[in-house]
Structure formats: C-alpha cells, structure tokens
Image (tube, helix red, strand yellow):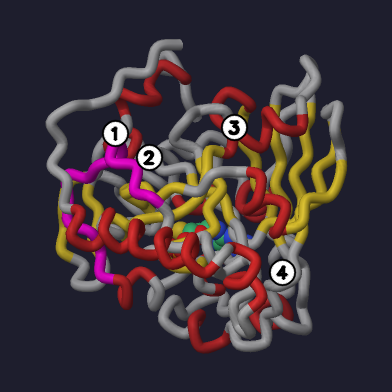
Amino acid sequence: MLIRIPEGWEIPERDATPESVYMNRREIVRAAGLAAVSSIAGYGATTAPYYPAKVNAKYKLDVPVTEEWAATGYNNYYEFHPTDKQAVKDRVGKFVTEPWSIKVSGLVNKPGTWDMDKILATFTLEERLYRFRCVERWAMAVPWTGFPLGDLVKAVETKGEAKFIRFETANLPAQMPGMKEAPVYPWPYYEGLRMDEAMHPLAMLVTGLYGKKLPKQNGAPIRVIVPWKYGYKSPKSIVKIEFLAKEPGTFWNKLNSSEYGFYSNVNPKKPHPRWSQAIEQVIPNMERRKTLMYNGYEEWVAGLYNGKED
Ligand code: MTE
C-alpha cells in the first residue's frame, strides 16, 4: 500500500528535542567513549546514550505540543490508580522497571526473550511528534522516542499464518497498588493489533518521552503507541508479544464488549455509549477542539480499512 505523507503541516518543534541538543549529546558520548559513559554510576545502558534521540522531522504536528508536566501528570494507568489520573505519578515509586525483558512467542521463526539492553542496542531510536487521543475525550500531543513496531516484527521473522499480534503488560500486584484496589478488572492488561496495523510505519514501540527515558507513569520501560487509535490500544510496560492466527481478545473488550471494539480507531462520527466523540479536550486546560478522523492520520491509515472498521 502506498502511504502518502501529508505536506505543509506546521512544525511546533519548540518542545521537541532540538538537533543542537542531540548533537551535543552525541559529541559528548563520542568524546567520552561509549563504554566509559555506560559504566558511570547512575547511567545504565538504558539511560545513556539513547536520550535525547534524533528528531524525525517527517512527523509533524498541526497543534501545540503539550507541556511535559501535563503529559506526565495526567495518566491512565489503572494498575497504579483505577480512578484518579493525577494520582498515578505519585504511586509508581515501587515499580521496578530495570532490568526488564519482553518474551516473544507464537507464530515466529525466532521466538525468544529480548532484554531492554538488547532492544536498545538493536533498534535505532528516534523522536516523533504525535497526537494522542483517549476515548474519554482528553487529548495531547507529545514527542515520543522509540522505533517502528514493524522493526521488531521483522527481526523475529513472523510466519505467514501470523495475522495478529497480542501484547501483555506487567503483572506485579506487589508494586502496582491499583491492581488490588480494582480486582474486577481482568488483569494483566492486554491488547492486540492486526498485523498490517502493527507493520504500519506510524505504529511504534516507545521507550522515551520529551527526550528522556519514558517515565513510569507513561509506561516505562517500553510501551506501544498507535496514534490513530484511542489510547487504550497503546499498552504500557509490555512483557509479552505473541503472534497469532486469530484475533486476540482485549482487556477492555473482556470487561465491556459493547463499549470497546477491537479496532477502536478515532472516529468523530462514532459516539462511544458514554462519550460523544465529536469534540476532544486538550490537557491540561481541557479546551475543546474538533476530533479528527483517525486522530488526524486519515491520509496515512485510511487505506488499512477501506471504510470498514470497528
Ligand atoms: N496500559 C496499561 N498497562 N494499563 C492501563 O491502564 N491505559 C491505557 C493505555 N495503556 C493503560 C495502558 C489508556 S486507557 C490510555 S488513554 C493510555 O494508556 C494513557 O497513556 P498516557 O498515560 O501515557 O497518556
């Protein structure tokens, strides 16, 4: 499929990492020597020299970048707090995100375990500005750092029968107080994508935000970001990736199948039973603006669905 890159979008890159900062960091790293930097106390391999990563200017915004304090202080991460978005950041202290690994299984030629150091050493990180839209209507626009999900899919060599990808996230009730507070939820959190969605260049595995390591409340150390879908399709702190022939179930669909379909593409014309989707509200001030089809990525992704989407 031919993917058309929209042209003429403005670039409010003032909050994204400027090239000069990236270059400075690179020069410092080169001068000090990679091994020396990695071994400095407090600078694990998952910290330096990966952030800030080079900005990929192809991914531009037509809306202002959200301030960092807002995007890292207003979160949906039910494992930590099932109701209060502003309390999530205050409850992540016990969450241990290093070391970390992801188990890859199912219909692949190269199943196995990928630890974070291997992931960071294998794939090239870059920073991209994306819109982000929650089904509850709040929206933001942020610089994520990561790499195309398709890069990992290619590296593990999926078999022809693999048509879907399933993600499972951390299941650590001792570190995640919300899990015990909300026992009715079908923990651990899990999600899925169709294989062509996963291979789309916009779909990312994200390890950083605002030019730094991903904060725990935003899904450290590694999460999915699919910018044309509602935010719940972007699972945080993933520990398992499985390749399947059949469409997998999802956490929210299991809880309430009439409200949360598998595709869940942002669509202003399709109201959720509890929230009209015509308007979105931008954090932190909640000013209203129109919701865009596929969250503004229609030209890029409409071809995946041919008008048929859930
Ligand atoms: N992933 C896990 N493991 N647990 C969650 O509760 N919430 C989802 C998604 N990923 C969630 C998750 C929802 S509903 C949204 S809107 C986004 O994360 C919020 O991401 P953010 O807090 O980084 O903005």
Q: Mark 4 or 3 closer to N-term?
A: 3
Which residue does the numbered mark 4 point to in the structure image? 184
Label 4: few (<14), some (14–19) or many (≥20) C-alpha neighbours in 10 Å: few
- The three-letter code of the residue at mark 4 reads Val
- The three-letter code of the residue at mark 3 reads Gly
187 horizontally vs 237: left or right: right
Q: Nearer the viewer, mark 3 or mark 1?
A: 3
Which residue does the numbered mark 1 point to in the structure image? 293
Q: Mark 2 or 3 closer to N-term?
A: 3
Gap between marks 3 and 1 measured at Cα: 23 Å
Q: Nearer the viewer, mark 4 or mark 3?
A: 3
Number of numbered discs present? 4
196 horizontally vs 160: left or right: left
- Look at the picture and state if 189 lies above or below 149: below
Q: Nearer the viewer, residue 184 or 6?
A: 6
Query: What mark, if any, has residue 266 been given in the picture?
Result: 2
Q: Is residue 274 visible?
A: no
